[in-house]
Image (tube, grey):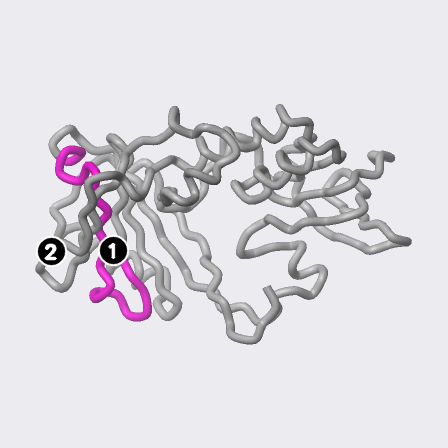
Amino acid sequence: MDSKIYDVIIVGAGPGGSSLAAKLAEVGLHVLILEKQSFPRYKVCGGGVTKRALLKMPIDITPIIRDQITSLITVEGNHDIQGFKHKTPFIYMVMRDELDQLLAKHAVDCGAELKEDSFVKRVVEYGGRVDVFTRDEKYSGRYLVGADGVNSIVAKQVGLMSERRKALALEYEFRCDQATNAKYKNKVIIDYTRVPDGYIWIFPKNGILSAGIGSYSLSQKLMSKYLLSFLDHQEMSGDLLSAKGSFCLLAVPGSQS
């Protein structure tokens, strides 16, 4: 058991959790980040960082940017429609395992403590503090921040966001050849018409393509069928690196968030 009482305990070492930890540690607070996995760890995510988000990053992420998007192409049926084109990039593509590890390291460099492989099971308010129980340890803090995503243990434990609507997402990542890489370079492709209650995307990452689908009404089996059909239409091929599913959170009007 860790007898130290932290000023702030943050559950989740994604971009939000690590960026907050860095800010708080920089002003002298004792901060603990609890991350359920160990770095580097995979995260289902298109990996697009908007220009606004890039400018707000606590550190320079240029070394891990894999592509810079200047075109958004929407697909309707069998037709590609140029939705948006700009002279300068408006989305910057990253791999989430690289981005999250970089930001977590920055938080540690600023003075935060990071505990990896620390899956939070329970949180309890007690005498003006919060006790956080992982599989192996108990930590105490004055404040607790839940930055642990759509399936947040913290939110469930403290009764927040009880009326949540989730959308299932499925993502394939491919290693592609030079010709395919050139075809999709600097472009994001999105189809809003093919999928009931959702959409399909392709994001380029310099030799790797992230292709995914999200919907709040389709089963995973049907989503895979829709996605593979779309990829066939795009004549996209490559070596499959991963196929992962996850949930996305949809806000419900009037619910707490």
Residue 221 placement, left or right of 120: left
Coordinates of residue 58 in the picture (x, y in percent): 52, 34
Name the kind of residue labelled 2 in the image.
Asp
The secondary element bearing badge 2 is classed as strand
- Within 10 Å of disc 1 (Cα), the crowding (few <14, some 14-19, many 20+) is many
Asked if 16 appears above or below 217 in the picture, the reply is above
- Within 10 Å of disc 2 (Cα), the crowding (few <14, some 14-19, many 20+) is few
The residue at 73%/49% (across/down) is 144
Hey, which quadrant is residue 10 in on the image?
top right
* Mark 2 to mark 1 CA distance (whole Å): 17 Å
**Foreground residue among 220 and 29:** 29
Q: Residue 80 carries which label?
A: 2
The residue at 76%/48% (across/down) is 143
Residue where numbered disc 1 is placed = 227
Q: Give the range drawn in magenta.
A: 180-200
> Which corner quadrant holds the C terminus?
bottom right
Residue 252 placement, left or right of 85: right
Hey, which quadrant is residue 53 in on the image?
top left
Q: Is residue 128 magenta?
A: no
- Marks counted in the figure total 2
Q: Nearer the viewer, mark 2 or mark 1?
A: 2
- Going from N to C along the chain, the mark reached first, 2 or 1, is 2
Coordinates of residue 250 in the picture (x, y in percent): 46, 65
The residue at 16%/58% (across/down) is 75
Whether residue 79 is visible here, answered yes or no, is yes
Coordinates of residue 248 in the picture (x, y in percent): 45, 58
